[in-house]
Image (cartoon, rainbow, N blue to C red):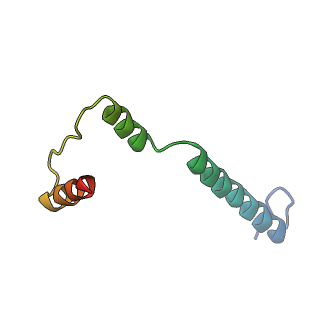
Amino acid sequence: MVSTLGLSLRERVCSRALFYLLVFTTMAVLNRILPDPAVAEAAKWEALGVAKPYFAVPYEEIERELFRHSK
């Protein structure tokens, strides 16, 4: 196997593992910091008093949501 840029196999594996750990950590942190766009959009419309549209939604899901809101 040809060594890439003079790095040993161990160094390449460590570098790749560190890169993916950094990417995963960044994604996890951003997921915690940034709000979910769908939730923010729903909250905005709810604050305006607009009902959530129920186009092509199964009846069971609507029934569950209406039951949850009625409590």
Residue 3: horizontal and vertical position, in percent? 81, 64
Seen in the picture, residue 16 relative to 10 is either above or below; the reply is above
Q: Quadrant of the C terminus?
A: bottom left
Task: Report if residue 7 is visible in the image.
Answer: yes
Report whether 60 appears left or right of 35.
left
Residue 20 occupies which quadrant of the picture? bottom right
Closer to the camera, 64 or 36?
64
**Whole-percent x and y of residue 29?**
64, 51
Q: Residue at x 15, y 44 (%)?
A: 55
From the viewer's perspective, tell me whether residue 25 is left or right of residue 51.
right
Q: Residue at x 27, y 31 (%)?
A: 49
Q: How many marks?
A: 0
Q: Which image quadrant: the N terminus?
A: bottom right
Point out residue 48 in the picture as x, y percentages from the top left corner: 31, 28
Residue drawn where x is 18% and y is 55% of the image: 62
Answer yes or no: is residue 2 visible: no
